Amino acid sequence: MPVIAVEHLTKRYGDLTAVSDVSFTVPEGEVFGFLGPNGSGKTTTMAMLLGLVRPTSGRMSLFDRDVTASHDEALKRVGAVVEIPSFYPYLSGRDNLRYFQGITQNGGAAEVAELLELVHLSERAHSRFSTYSMGMKQRLGIAYALLGDPDLIFLDEPTNGLDPAGMAEVRGLIRDLKGEKRTVVLSSHLLNEVEQVCDSVAILSRGRLIAQGAVADLLRRQDQIQFKTTNDEEAAAIVRGLPWVSSVTVDDKGNLVATAPADRAWEITATLAQQRVYVVAMAPVQESLERYFLEVTSDNQGITEETAP
């Protein structure tokens, strides 16, 4: 049973369709990424899953509980950070967590101490929230999402406004959460972030789901082999003649790039050697998420972020 199941989800605001007929599932224990340009519908989709926005049509469930029909039951095992929570600036990080803990009636003082340790804020637990850096505020927000030990966590752009060191720290924390067998849903427009921490991804553009699957599978969809030889011009002609090679091009560094299964690289070497052309360097080319993303969203540039009334 998937932790999240979405079927034909649609959200319209008057004439604007923010999300259109989106369907996907999220298995237990993954870091699942919502990726898309501004205005793609990822924030609206997350808001619907959290019961903050009512869908126009479609069905969505968390832990097999319908979000619309059984809102409270569906969200019992869920924690979320949408932007930075509204903490009280004059309270310490510890007292803010204890305040929200009192509202939810989950856990005790020991849990707050454990969460502050988990997000590396123990040394500043008694400092006022107003004195926290942006990275510390983001980490306290993640601790807030973990109150009550939820099994599913939603994080919306958790590294927004952070410097490189802060980004790396938050990404490490997300990986730690997965290690504790929680399911994490991460909304982000940062391709490098998604590629580093997510197991699978759904790519949205103009409200539509245009690609989904395991990150490794998306990047493995077309094998390429990069190589240099003692005679690149002749090598290109020879390799183009192989029936299982789709194309041979030259990259911006002057390397030959053959579109072919990576496990047949040895056959390229052997075939060229028979013609007295010798390979001096060869390596598989790993598709980057950035290149894949730009390819599948190439006709959706320049869209602005959707705004809900």
Image (spheres, rainbow, N blue to C red):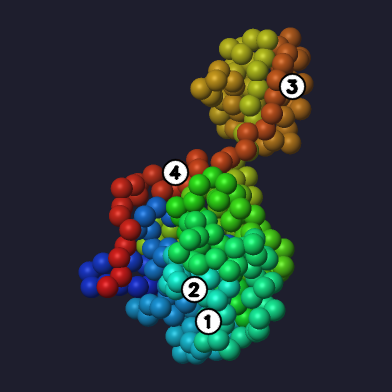
Tell me which label, 3 or 1, sits earlier in the chain. 1
Indicate the position of residue 207 as horizontal and vertical percent values.
Answer: 37, 62
Residue at numbered disc 4: 294
Indicate the position of residue 42 as horizontal and vertical percent values.
Answer: 43, 63
> Relative to residue 180, is residue 33 drawn left or right?
left
Q: CA distance from mark 3 to mark 4?
A: 32 Å
Q: Which mark is residue 269?
A: 3
Residue at numbered disc 2: 91
Q: CA distance from mark 3 to mark 1?
A: 66 Å
Mark 3 residue type: Thr
> Relative to residue 227, is residue 39 drawn left or right?
left
* Contact flag, marks 3 and 1 (Cβ < 8 Å): no
Q: Nearer the viewer, residue 267 or 291?
A: 291
Mark 1 residue type: Tyr
Indicate the position of residue 243 as horizontal and vertical percent values.
Answer: 64, 30
Quarter of the image with the N terminus is bottom right
Relative to residue 292, is residue 65 depicted above or below?
below
Q: CA distance from mark 4 to mark 1?
A: 44 Å
Q: Residue 206, can we see it?
A: no
